[in-house]
Amino acid sequence: MSTTTTTAHDTATAITSLLRDHGQSDYIGERISQLAHSLQCAHLASTHTSDPDTILAGLLHDIGQFLPEAQVQQLAGEVQHLRSSDNETGSVGRVGHEDIGALYLNSLGFSAKVCALVAAHVPAKRYLCAVEPAYHDTLSEASKTSLRLQGGPMSEAEVKQWKSGQWSEEMCRLRKWDDEAKVVDLKVPGVEAYDGLIEEHLEAVGKGQR
Ligand code: FE
């Protein structure tokens, strides 16, 4: 009987294929593709930080939008299940592409930091809208529309909780790169530039080094 082991290399190849094959649709309401947006976000991250987790979160923050519908439904069910067993009221709230993406990356062996940054890219927008009045004006029309569906700016209590959380600074920086990464026809490195980084990251997590 043979056993199949998924290596870091296999997972990195699967992720880059997913980005290439499912990234051609428009980035919601914007004039660039999902893939171009993700690559611009990763490139912005790599020019401002050398932290591989933050760069990978830039590349993969919207991975929940690249997954096939059946997988999205399955992961959404898992998020709901985790939340309802986590809180007494049984209320699960909205499950967005950020939650689905984070759970997916967690299942593939990405670090807690990558998953947390991915999960936070929508709440970070809600946080920034609450604490930086000028930030809201910098958002595109599509992003202003989605903000309303995502719960609007954070309340005072939510802001307080957010600020005390781990990696909140990186989460805000990632959010701003996400907002900027919408330049039509901008030339940036392609998916292949991140293949090795994904593989090294997964290997390091697998060895307990992250
Ligand atoms: Fe995005």
Image (spheres, helix red, strand yellow):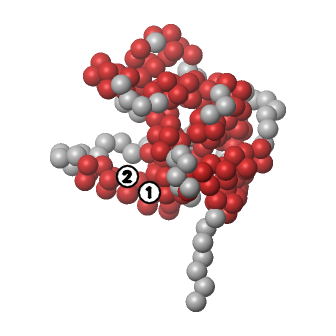
| Residue 130 pos. (x, y %) | 40, 17
Q: Amino acid at mark 2?
A: Val
What residue is at 56 percent from the left and 24 percent from the top?
173
- The quadrant in which residue 180 appears is top right
102, 19: nearer the viewer? 102
| Residue 85 pos. (x, y %) | 25, 53
Circle 2: element type: helix
| Outermost left residue | 88
Q: Work out whether residue 50 can be spotted.
A: yes
Crowd band around label 1 with a 10 angstrom C-alpha radius: few (<14), some (14–19), many (20+): many
Q: What residue sits right under mark 2 in the picture?
A: 79
What residue is at 72 percent from the left and 45 percent from the top?
194
| Outermost top residue | 134
Labels 2 and 1 touching (C-beta < 8 A): yes
Q: Is residue 136 above or below residue 51?
A: above
| Residue 109 pos. (x, y %) | 53, 55
Left or right of 88, for residue 112 = right
| Outermost right residue | 187
Q: Quadrant of the N terminus?
A: bottom right
Find the distance from the CA under tag 2 to the CA under tag 1: 6 Å
| Residue 209 pos. (x, y %) | 55, 48
Crowd band around label 2 with a 10 angstrom C-alpha radius: few (<14), some (14–19), many (20+): some
Q: What residue sits right under mark 1 in the picture?
A: 75
